[in-house]
Image (tube, rainbow, N blue to C red):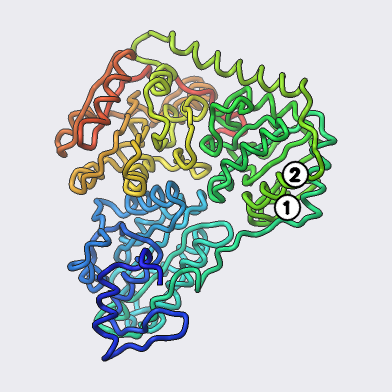
Amino acid sequence: MKLGLYSLSTIAYNAVHKRTCGQQLPGRILVTTMNTGQALIELLKTEGVRHLFGIVGSTFLDVLDALYDDTSMEYINVRHEQGAAFMADGLARVTGQPAACLVTSGPGATNLLTGVAAAYVAHSPVVAITGGPMSVNYERDAFQELDLVNMFKPVTKLSVLINKPERIPELMRYAFRMAMTGRKGPVFVEIPRDVLNHHDIEMETIPPEQYRPDNARLPHPDAIAKAAQMLQQAERPLLVVGGGVNWAHANDLMTRFSDRLSLPMITAYGRNDALPNSHPLYIGPLGRAGAPEAAEACKRADLLFVIGSRLGNFTTYYDHRYIQPGTRMIQIDIDSRDIGRIYPVELGMLADAAEALNALLVHADQASLSPASETWQAEARGLRDARQSRLEEEGNLSTLPVKPQRVYNELRRVLAADTIVTLDAGAAPAYGYDRLHFSTPRTFITPLDLGTLGLSFPAALGAKLGRPGAPVLAIHGDGGFLMNAQEIETAVRHGINVVTLVMNNNCWGSEKAYQKHFYQERYVGADIGNPRYDQYAELFGAKGYYVEHPDQIGDVLTEAFQCGKPAVIEVPIDPDEFPVPATGGRRG
């Protein structure tokens, strides 16, 4: 029995009931009788869930009642259910473990939808649970009755209704199995209130390894041999590293593979933390607001070795601006869905990133593979150096209001190596994709191709709960921050001390950039007003800072991390400074 998987209260409960209502099964923990609320909590705890995000609702009070005497799990009572889903997503992304929400029916559940969609795009194992109406009232247009199962299907790996109390253990284990195996992702579970309330069921406390597989998918030996052969034949091979490397905990293997064969590396959009950015063969991030030097490397490569990336919209635009026609490609992914989906591959490998890299390293030594040419290595180093020089030059930007590029220059100077950064959608945050520096895996959370405004701050709260020892910084524009700024109260009440940087240009910057470049500056709906966000934070009991000069940003940020409270730093930025809009369409 692995005591780490079970709370002491569970073990004590099982011991008390052993004589009266339990029996020991071979190879399993004791079968006990408990009510359905207790059973749901114990099932979550068995999976390591220690924070449950949501807003209290009458449909699941029996579940919350089980927490009254059990301090091993905390119900994080938020101010909007969307924030709950974003928090769970942030926690899951930085830990690699499942996270959970629990909300009520009707609008409680529909408010989760955007956050669950964000987890789906990020392949994040979020288990979203909602209490439903009474079973007898389904299909009667009852109070807060909606077809939630079908509503959540497009943005989950599994969407299911549990209609009998005794099926709660079986189907919750099924939900976690779906969330955590293969390409990870969210699941949705609806349980009618009468199923959750006042029922005693028999439940076996089974460790996760006994109901969901934990063995990674192995690569085929022939595929490994062919990949090695293609690398040896290439003149300018380039590694394109995606989020699958993070989920597979393959970051060290990735850099070892690069070192072994002297292979230059770039990262997929929003996946900068998959590699230590200080690595001499790392050029930069590819994609919409990525590094032009990484784009140039991609254009120059004659072989793209893509590992753990689906080559999504903001990474490639699905055209040939970065990936040249006829470029040979190897693509390794845990799921076959995206291998060769947009760009034809010469070799598609269905495998876990870590297992594939392990096999490639072994094969490289056995076959005495040669490193990439000195000429290509030198070209890659030149691109890396050009990027570093370009970014350092932005430290000389001294105009007021502050340029967002200068803000990121100051952040790079003071952020600790283990800082977790959550980056919101929008124009001002977009500058960060090319300008932030990462040393540690699972320290960069972005909206990815969903482009979700308002994600960053609540995701940062979840990340801080998942890794309480790490400093956490949320970066927002003014518009996106106000979408979930009410969660400052949640952060203060629960003592979740994250720092939020709000760059304020009083507009929806991404859309204003399009109107500037494509609509002759005919601005409609782009300009907005805002409170002073430092004062707004103080009203909730957080710490607020207002910074107008770039040389103050570093000192204020350091103070904010040390203030012992959630903190908000507002920086007014140049309202006329926008990233160049995407040219693949007028939205994005």
Q: Which of marks 2 and 1 is nearer the N terminus?
A: 2
In this rendering, the answer to whether 90 lies above or below 231 is below
Q: Do the residues labelled 2 and 1 touch (CB within 8 Å)?
A: yes
Residue 420 is situated, as x and y percent measured from the top left of the image, at: 40, 37
Q: Is residue 263 left or right of residue 558?
A: right
Foreground of the two, 2 or 441: 2
Picture layout, residue 417 above or below residue 388: below
Q: Which amino acid does label 2 sit on?
A: Ile
- In this view of the protein, which residue sits in the foreground, 312 or 14? 14
Q: Name the residue under label 1.
A: 349
Q: In which quarter of the image is residue 478?
A: top left
Q: How many labels does the image show?
A: 2
Residue 137 at what x, y percent from top left?
32, 80
Residue 242 placement (x, y as % from top left): 59, 42
Q: Which residue lies furthest to the bottom in this view?
A: 20
Residue depicted at 25% across the width and 71% down the height: 9
How crowded pointer 1 is (Cα within 10 Å; few <14, some 14-19, many 20+) is rated as many
Point out which mark residue 374 bears.
none
Mark 2 sits on what residue?
A: 330
User: At which x and y percent is residue 334?
Assistant: 63, 55
Q: Can residue 492 be seen in this view?
A: yes
Judging depth in this view, the residue of 437 and 516 nearest the camera is 437
Quarter of the image where one finds residue 543: top left
> Which residue is pictured at 42% across the width and 25% down the height?
523
Amino acid type, label 1: Met
Q: Is residue 577 left or right of residue 497?
A: right
Q: Which of 54 and 221 is in front in this view?
A: 221
